[in-house]
Image (tube, rainbow, N blue to C red):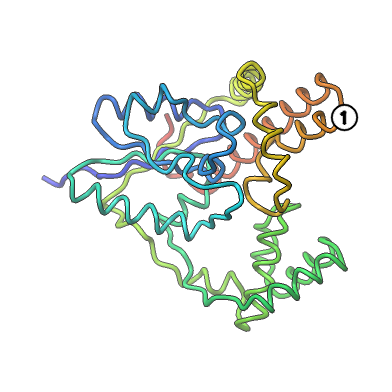
Amino acid sequence: MSKPPSVILLAGPTASGKSALALDMARETGAVIVNADSQQLYADLRILTARPSPEEEAMADHRLYGVVDAAEAWSVGKWSRAVLDLLSELRDEGRPAILVGGTGLYFMALTRGLADIPSVPSSVRDTIEADYLQDGETALRQRLADIDPASASAIEQGDRQRLVRAMSVHAATGRTLSAWKAETQPLLTPSDWTGLVVEPDRARLYDNCDRRVDQMMDQGVLAEVQALTQRNLDPALPAVKAVGLRELAAHLSGETDISTAVAALKQATRNYAKRQLTWFRNQTADWPRV
């Protein structure tokens, strides 16, 4: 009889209830809960990113939550290396793991692989950054579409970091980013993991998003956002791109009143959940739904 998978990949959009489900599963099985959300890595925004509370973390072993300062930038590659090291330790201890989050690229790195792309010289990246600042996103996106349409279509509007990255890879290596990715191998052996997607119906999901924002306001999210904005960090850093940060910062700077900021935060959260829902339906169609 084959042994059951030692790793559960528990994915889903924000406010879908996946963290609560992971906690229930961990308490039943003794599994370690491992963060697979790119924003919950950062220590500065526990409330805004809906990280597990200290009380929830005390109920089960949680790893890779709030371990990175907002001034740092973790890539999917850096997260993947940290996770593989952690899973190796847990395997030696005979402990299962539940990887829970909403960052689809993290799950794809584990199940489909990461491209072994040569490092890009900083001079090349600086040149592409200068092009972005001079010509704008639309022009740079069109240039990428001409040479690498697959990458261009996969990068969301406003994602400067990934756009510059794709252009820089081509400039430095002479090959497109999509060509490098086509050579990837899964980081996890298929027999070692099973995937689940938490997928509420859309109306319920949106209601959950709105209620979560109300809870954030009650928990003091404004003070958390103010503390981060006062650091004057590079706006290109991942933590500074957290969903809702811009809307609440606009209120703190006097640009909007509180009711406008809360309404904008709710809309931004629903929009994000919708994008995640669509992504998981397209990219993990063969994973069971719960």
**Side (left or right) of 220 relative to 75:** right
The residue where tag 1 is placed is: 254
**Crowd band around label 1 with a 10 angstrom C-alpha radius: few (<14), some (14–19), many (20+):** few
Above or below, 235 relative to 98? below
Q: Position of residue 260 (x, y in %)?
A: 83, 23
- At x 35%, y 25%, the residue is 58
Q: The C terminus lies in which quarter of the figure?
A: top left
For mark 1, give the secondary structure. loop
**Side (left or right) of 193 relative to 112:** left
Residue placed most toward the observer, 128 or 219? 219
Q: Position of residue 21 (x, y in %)?
A: 40, 26
**Kind of residue at disc 1:** Gly
- At x 79%, y 67%, the residue is 140
Above or below, 256 relative to 65? above
Q: The N terminus lies in which quarter of the figure?
A: top left
Residue 151 picture quarter: bottom right
Residue placed most toward the observer, 65 or 16? 65
Residue 10 picture quarter: top left
Residue placed most toward the observer, 28 or 42? 42
Above or below, 174 relative to 87? below
